[in-house]
Image: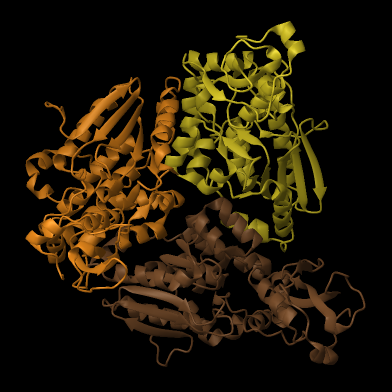
Chain colours: A brown, B yellow, C orange
Amino acid sequence: MTATATPETIRERREGAIVTLTIDNAPVNAMSATVIRELRDALGRLAVDPAARVIVFESAVPGFFIAHVDMRLGEQMDVLGPLSESTPDGTNVFQAVGEQLRRQPQVTIVKLAGIARGGGAEFVAAADITYAGRSTGQLGQIETLMGIVPAGGGTQYLLERVGRHRALEIILTGDAVDADTAAAFGWINRVVPDDELDAAVARTARRIADLPDGVIAATKRILQPETPLKGYLREEEEWAALIKRPAAAHLMSRSLKLGAQTVASSFARGRSPPHLPACESIIRGGQELIATREICHVEVTHYRAAGGTPNSRVPRSRRVLLSLAVHRPASRGAAPETFLARPRGSSCTCRSKAAKTGHPRS
Amino acid sequence: MTATATPETIRERREGAIVTLTIDNAPVNAMSATVIRELRDALGRLAVDPAARVIVFESAVPGFFIAHVDMRLGEQMDVLGPLSESTPDGTNVFQAVGEQLRRQPQVTIVKLAGIARGGGAEFVAAADITYAGRSTGQLGQIETLMGIVPAGGGTQYLLERVGRHRALEIILTGDAVDADTAAAFGWINRVVPDDELDAAVARTARRIADLPDGVIAATKRILQPETPLKGYLREEEEWAALIKRPAAAHLMSRSLKLGAQTVASSFARGRSPPHLPACESIIRGGQELIATREICHVEVTHYRAAGGTPNSRVPRSRRVLLSLAVHRPASRGAAPETFLARPRGSSCTCRSKAAKTGHPRS
Amino acid sequence: MTATATPETIRERREGAIVTLTIDNAPVNAMSATVIRELRDALGRLAVDPAARVIVFESAVPGFFIAHVDMRLGEQMDVLGPLSESTPDGTNVFQAVGEQLRRQPQVTIVKLAGIARGGGAEFVAAADITYAGRSTGQLGQIETLMGIVPAGGGTQYLLERVGRHRALEIILTGDAVDADTAAAFGWINRVVPDDELDAAVARTARRIADLPDGVIAATKRILQPETPLKGYLREEEEWAALIKRPAAAHLMSRSLKLGAQTVASSFARGRSPPHLPACESIIRGGQELIATREICHVEVTHYRAAGGTPNSRVPRSRRVLLSLAVHRPASRGAAPETFLARPRGSSCTCRSKAAKTGHPRS
């Protein structure tokens, strides 16, 4: 499929044989239909460009590599439709992303310095090599929390890399997995200190790009991947059955309504989500949480005064945040999980905003 | 097979969708025919109970999860016989335990806070997820030390999880493997600090149990295990040939005669085995050893005086234990391995018992 | 194939059921045609010796286990030819080494206390069990740096042990991999402190050798390896196509011309290569580099005076080595990589040799 316009979400730059594709779809690099199309175009074009030997994937959005597949894909059928009609036999449009990566002639390297969840984690697991920053990189296979299952190849790629027992744990808990654990599991190649990530990726890309002619292609042919056709079919069948259920529709629509993407992106940009006070404590607490939780909705549950008296009636100027309640998307009517999210040394300085919105439970 | 009486060895409790099965077959949770039958009954009943979503396995016996298959199974044919006649095609009664676990609709989680060896290690490797306590959890595939081979699926589950090179090492050394090494190998999912194990298992169980309807079953169908039929047959053939050999019969009968289960269980309960003096040093030395060795027989080889003179003729009241000799089950006539097992700060206070039995080599 | 003469490169000693084969082909234990023939003879003889139960492989050459396949094999066709004509169907003479190891009745254990690269790394990955010294053991799959691909089974053994993503990274970077990383990847079984390696290997060998009759053979039959025939064929095809290319011939001939084996072996024996001054700093710097780099050619690029002034004109007696430039074999015309290789506390004491050869860039 030819690109007839300047890409909106994938920027390309080139240094000799090394191509860098930068994903830029603020606020969280959701994998929208446009991202899928522009990836497919770029990879398709590079597949027949023998001068390109290595492709590095990185993100322009701080804190996120690819947060997840865009929950608004249903509104993007004009773009998604044609993509879905031209996938390899036996694959859906998301598995086709993985298949294209796995069969790409170039060596594909992901520089993971942010969150990759759902379809983003599938992307990482389909690429040849991934290096993650120790505290910045993070993975999570979160589909079950939304009432569905991974259906972009993720179950198969995880099975291949970490084994059935860890694949089940990762998929069924939907937990965020930090870079050290991901490397220990074999989900990614390596974890490196945050400030060494750029250099590590650049060195490996350069070393591989400098190989003599024919060697990369020969190696990739010897180690060509198998296509897990039976697994892809199972993913598609199970996903199709679950997506019809009220729970999935409800969870995804509730998630959208509560603005999951807005909540996470607000915190990522150092702001409070619109429905909360613009309070430093809340912002920092929220930032700590998005590093470890799939946030659907956040509310401040209570304050305590500096010095330790919970819930006392003290002037707002002396209150600090004690906790943020996070509604996990798949809670089946259960009480929201409450996390202690008190930024170190924080104090609440939100007198002005509070006067307008009112702190809950003051 | 229906249970017509209250289970003796498997206790069940339930908290919503989470079922906990507690294995209680003191002194060491040997996997007896009754344990096998009660497990099969419980799992069979739960398999058709859609309200149950997660099964957690734990032990009521401190220090042990499942020490090994009961060496007295030959005396339990009234129970074992019927179980052996109703196994899936191509499996023996031990492999059937593994197959049932692997195909169980619920997610199975083992809380490993004790020793799991032989058939116990096979049970762990057949369950979906295992978390182990850092110093309490321990695994070992010890069948070769008894002159046979694992024949309950263990060779296949190890091959799947840790690879051929580590499977060979684990099976042929029969060594005890601590929780950190087991996690690094991928034999289990995770190792956690001892005091965090309960919470970690509970959290994962809760998180999975809270998933929307249909998601667990869908995920388990996508990631259904393969049945390693060829491997099961090879296990059965090789085991059947070895069990006929004099060595195996001799080792197992010697092990029973010397009371391996009695020795280990005595130490586990803070007592000296009947054939040794009731001496604090011996008890503590033995407890250290059972954490790391498959003990067949223990004898005290010599004393040294507090302060460092080996083997001197000093009054018993001033002697401390220097070493325990452990006869490893499969030693082919070799001298017993001697371990330095001197509990820190111990002194021998067994004047009274010694007067009756006499310390060896006084 | 019967050995009619005393082996030149493989020494054998025996202690009961444990056979130790010591590889001794100074200066770097290159895998020459003679080494291949003598290994094949020894393993073939031992395969029908039921009293032998364990084979330990070690090296007599400090710093090296098997540095790589001998680059002069083309000159050894009188020995290599007959070996190549008698390989198992579908394998070349190098894959036949791996196949023989994998199917050997005895348990094979590699004691890795040196560098194993290329064919040496393939040997390690084909053996049953490998323990490596933490700072002495090292692996590398370096064929791509020479313009070819591993064709001795290495791609398949790596795929089996570390997964496709890490196999691609290891093979395409050709990087030296230290023992801790190799163990974390699962390439080898274990890493142990250098001073514990002998004891660890001896203990495991003894423990396995002491198993009752029939147990080792039974276990190895249950866990017999698959023969990756398709992968072997792909290796052979791709290698055969690449070896014809000018680049490969050039790189290997250049490597030979510059005396890669001579450079590395000189440093390993505590000497400067013939084309460099006989200077302590150079020797120590070179020794540090051969532990981490595939050295093709070394030149001293500049000096700095003790105390910090780069490139000043100071008397030679006060100069210390600042860097060694290493030409990586596969650099496609790029500038040589320069490494800081200044041995701690070194000072240059080469007044006499310098007078004869002259230091570069004095």
**Residue found at the very far right of the displayed protein:** A313
Residue A337 drawn above or below residue C223: below
> In screen coordinates, is B52 left or right of B342?
right
Quadrant of the snapshot with the C terminus of chain C: bottom left
Number of marks present in the image shown: 0
Instruction: Give coordinates of residue B253: x percent, y percent.
Output: 59, 14
- Looking at the image, is C148 positioned above or below residue B340? below
Tell me where residue A148 sits by quadrant.
Answer: bottom right
Q: What residue is at 89 percent from the left and 83 percent from the top?
A: A315
Residue B349 in which image quadrant: top right
Q: Nearer the viewer, residue C287 or A299?
A: C287
Residue in front for this viewpoint, C159 or A240? C159
Q: Is residue C143 left or right of residue A311?
A: left
Quarter containing the N terminus of chain C: top left
Expressed as whole percent of the image width and height from the top left, the position of residue A3 reads 40, 88
Q: Is residue A18 visible?
A: yes
> Residue C229: image x %, image y %?
30, 47
Q: Which residue is at a point 62% across and 32% down the rendered structure image? A: B291
C172 or A77, nearer to the observer: C172
* In the rendered image, the vertical position of residue C7 relative to residue A234, given as above or below: above
Q: Is residue C294 visible?
A: no
Q: Position of residue A134 (x, y in %)?
A: 53, 66
